[in-house]
Amino acid sequence: MIQKISSNEYLKRFDKMTAAEKRSMIDRVGQWLRGAGRTLKVREVDPMARLQNVMQVSLGWNDVECQAWMEGVKLLTAFVTIKDTWLPDMIYNMAAKRGIKKIHNVLSEVMADKDLVSGPVPKNTENKAAFKPVKEEHAEGTKSVTHAVADRAAVKDPKSAEEHIVSMQYSKLAVVRPKHIDQYAHLLPKKTQEKAATIRGLLRDLDTARENMRKLMEAGDNSADKTAQWARTAAKIDEKVKKIYMEIDAEWEKLVNTGKVKVDAVGNVSVTDSAVSQSQHTEPEKPELTSEQKHRRRDLRKWLIDTRRGAEGKAREKRIEQWKVNIREYLTLEPAEAALKDKKIVAAAKHYGVKIEELKN
């Protein structure tokens, strides 16, 4: 069975390694891709790997396959500041197929990155520049700033020159994303924050769908239709979670690119210039509604809170579908926060078994 990796098992960050350590790490990655990685790749095509996370599906794996996964995840820890590794939790929560593919993709990208694989040029034996950047910059017979810094560092201490050049190459990686979304979600756009807040519930629903599907498959007798229904539910939730994570990743990247993000010792994120942060991440105010829109809003609310119709049977199903259509339109005219505070709207939603939070986007 798979064991989640703990923080004290993380490998040394690649951007903090010496040249020799980097070469050793690249060798380990290559060996994994040629050996254990191929073993794990076989499990990617399992039908259940698309519907269950690795903690669930690995119950049917052998020790070699489990070890291949854990070794692959451990290798990922060296690249958390360079690649999107889905660590610490996302890689365990997503479908196993996607987790396997993520490990392969990240480690394959590492091997394909010539700058990472080749590393800095080895130092020479003379008391000159210990390293030269790949792209040389010259200006009318003068050395580039990077060359000059390397030269001065090399004269004092060749090893410090290597570390200086490497640190310059990876300076853009100084901001490390915190492990938990809650630590930086407050700096993301409001709509992204709202979606991020639903992830925990969605993951619980996903686990429930997968568990129900597993039980039905084990039961066997005449459960094919119900199993397929739960499989579709699981796939739908999984896709929704994926889109939210992708949006969070994109917004985090935008935030870091401002150059004003800092992370404290415990992983909490803040922006050095609050005014810039406020202007970039505050949603623009919506324009005032026209008189026609206000009238339509009143009519929609009146219709939505009327629960006298559609008591049962097909009439109720039809009413519920129309209620969903109308609430979506209503939310374009009334902020979702206000609608969720409207007791009559909330009561009607409960009456029809509709979750407004899932319809507001």
Image (cartoon, helix red, strand yellow):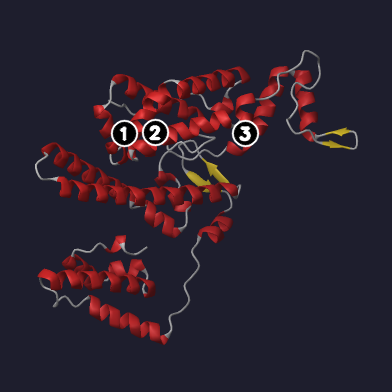
SS class, disc 1:
helix
- Depth-wise, is mark 1 or mark 2 nearer the camera? 2
Locate residue 204, reporting x and y percent.
26, 46
Amino acid at pointer 1: Val
Residue beneath disc 3: 170
Q: Quadrant of residue 345?
A: bottom left
SS class, disc 2:
helix
User: For the point 47% across and 47% down, which residue is it?
Assistant: 249
Q: Earlier in the sequence, mark 3 or mark 2?
A: 2
Residue beneath disc 1: 54
Against 341, residue 10 (above or below) is above
Asked if disc 1 and disc 2 are in contact, CB closer than 8 Å, the reply is yes
* Placement of the N terminus among the 4 image quadrants: top left
User: For the point 39% across and 82% down, which residue is it?
Assistant: 293
Amino acid at pointer 2: Ile
Q: From this viewpoint, is residue 89 visible?
A: no
Residue beneath disc 2: 100
Asked if disc 3 and disc 2 are in contact, CB closer than 8 Å, the reply is no
